[in-house]
Image (tube, helix red, strand yellow):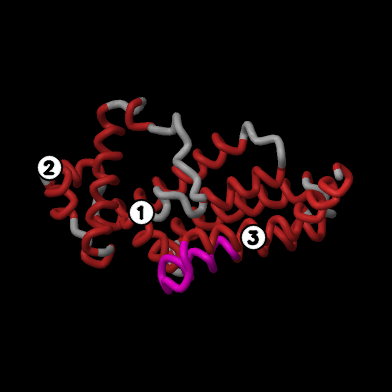
Amino acid sequence: MKAAVVAGSGRKDEAGPYEGMRLKLIDATLAVVGDVGLENLTIRRVSEHAGVSVGLVHHHFENKQSLVYKTFEHLIRRVREQLVNGRRDIADPVVRMKFTADMCFNDEVMSQGAANVWPHMWSSSAHEQDVRRLCTAFSRRLRSNFIFDFRQAGCDPLMSRIYAIQAMALVHGLWIEHRVAATISIDEAIGVFHGMIDDATHRIWKMNLRSSHLR
């Protein structure tokens, strides 16, 4: 089951007019990218979709490159905020890991605009230092979360790191298989991810053992 967007993270209601307009323009950017792709994104198309002047877009973003970078930053910040807010109240490390896995495939991340932006973000990180720093920080935080959870689930330090690396590979691999190659469904992607977590933590074995004791 796909994770819902965590409630209470709607920053638009809390933002001032300036930041609110920037978020409106980023939303318009995602909508345009969803319609025509990032390669066909223009400042004029964003202004038309947002119902504002081209000059106003340039007031908030110097150029298309700046707008795209801020859109990358916005997507990463949104996922990070939702992970922090959602993980905070989950005591069970296995459930927490499954929530983390689900968040990587939630409706917002998989929306047409966002799904068109993510591959460009990762590819551009190869030659743009600012984007690379964003991607590196995001990956390190996500991997750190998985390591922490596997440790809490009883795995030793070495295996926790190995399982965390496998989890990160699944984040990227399953996303590509579902969204780009279209070879698996979203339920299959999440099912494989949950299965890996269960296998790594012997969750199924523990549940079966507990059930046998109750008979």
Residues at marks 2 and 1, CA–CA distance in whole angstroms: 22 Å
- As measured in the structure, the alpha-carbon distance from the residue carrying label 2 to the one carrying label 3 is 42 Å
Q: Amino acid at mark 1?
A: Ser
Residue 195 magenta-drawn?
Answer: no
Residue at image location 43% in from the left, 68% down from the top: 123
Along the line of sight, the residue nearer the viewer: 204 or 26: 204
Q: Position of residue 96 (x, y in %)?
A: 65, 43
Badge 3 element = helix
Q: Which residue is mark 2?
A: 51
Q: Which residues are magenta?
A: 170-185
Q: Which residue sits at x=89%, y=45%?
A: 213
The residue under the point 82% across, 47% down is 211
Judged by depth in the image, the label closer to the viewer, 2 or 3, is: 3
Chief SS of the magenta region? helix
> Counting other residues with Cα less than 10 Å from the Cα at mark 3, is it few (<14), some (14-19), or many (20 or more)?
many
Name the one closer to the observer, 179 or 117: 179
**In this rendering, position of residue 101 left or right of residue 44:** right
Is residue 153 rendered to the left or right of residue 71?
right
Q: Nearer the viewer, residue 82 or 2?
A: 2
Q: Residue furthest front?
A: 215
Give whichever of discs 2 and 1 has the lower sequence position. 2
**What number is the disc on residue 111?**
1
Q: Which mark is residue 167?
A: 3
Q: First in sequence, mark 2 or 3: give its number.
A: 2
Q: Label 1: few (<14), some or many (≥20) within 10 Å? A: some
Pick out the residue farthest to the right. Answer: 213
Q: Work out whether 71 lies above or below 33.
A: above
